[in-house]
Amino acid sequence: MEPISNEKFGRFVSELRKEKNLTQKELAEQLYVTDKTVSKWERGLSMPNVALLIPIAEVLNVTVTELLRGERIIKDERIAVSEVEGLVVGSLDLKLQDTLRQQKRNWALAFLICCLLVVGEAVLLFMSDLTFDRKDVLAVTGLMLVFGGWFCFFAKDLLPRYYDGNKVNYYTQGIVRMHLPGLSFNNSNWSCICRLLKTGTLSIAVLYPLICLIIIHVFDLTLWNQIKGPLIWCGLGSLVIGTYIVGKKYE
């Protein structure tokens, strides 16, 4: 059985729509979606939600199996149950891939915004007339941006299947090593852990220099020198503890 193809699905939907003399807008209105959504289907850029497969098939007068195969089934042709199951699972996989791609884009935008905020904070730090070591502030911020960027752009969305069948408490990818005794990584908790680490590292990157600016201008430099160390450890500790909490909750 051939895997479901976004392009083949889209071409088939486009052909069926034109056979019924429907515009993309008219088809969209019958399905309660936008014409842009229909356009994305037909161009092979995305797949519809599984819940929409039956309504689409009914409007276009085909079966769901034909819709997923991207072609009409010859009369009296027998379709194996395994193929039907494969088509349904394949449609779920494609929808999941669309969702993951959208999430990647959202996190890329969040990372860009954080970078712009950090640049603004760095400018304010260097404009300050107080004499203090700015390098440690920028070092912590830069390190958090590096880790946050890695999780936003390079961390795998899904773990290999052996993580689900075995209790694995370590994760390696390139130069990144994570080893958390007592916590098993799997596809039930991995996305939640990644979301926490993305949010946490980017938040620290933005908040650490901001807190520095507030304290040295509202209070004094002495107070900042006293709390900057504990502040870093609290931030890193919250990431580790949060990872354990989220990981155990969805383990």
Image (tube, rainbow, N blue to C red):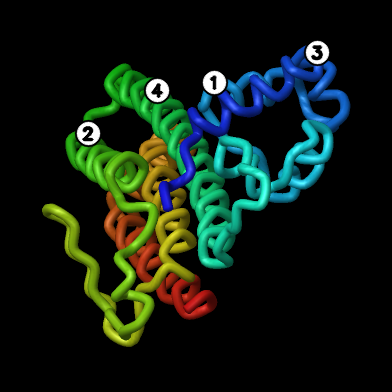
| Labelled disc at residue 21 | 3
Q: Position of residue 182 (x, y in %)?
A: 33, 87
Q: Residue at x 32, y 85 (%)?
A: 167
The residue mark sitting in front, 1 or 4, is: 1
Image height check: is 78 above or below 14?
Answer: below
Residue corresponding to mark 4: 116
Inter-mark Cα distance, 1 to 4: 34 Å
Between residue 88 and residue 157, name the one nearer to us.
88
Q: Residue at x 39, y 47 (%)?
A: 204
Let me know if residue 216 appears in the view. Answer: no
Residue type at mark 2? Arg
Residue corresponding to mark 2: 134
Between residue 219 and residue 164, name the one nearer to us.
164
Q: Earlier in the sequence, mark 3 or mark 1?
A: 3
The residue mark sitting in front, 3 or 1, is: 3
Inter-mark Cα distance, 2 to 3: 67 Å
Q: Is disc 4 placed on a helix, strand or loop?
A: helix
Q: Position of residue 87 (x, y in %)?
A: 54, 53
Residue type at mark 3? Asn
- Classify 10 Å Cα crowding around label 3: few (below 14), some (14-19), many (20 and above): few
Give left or right: position of 198 versus 169: right
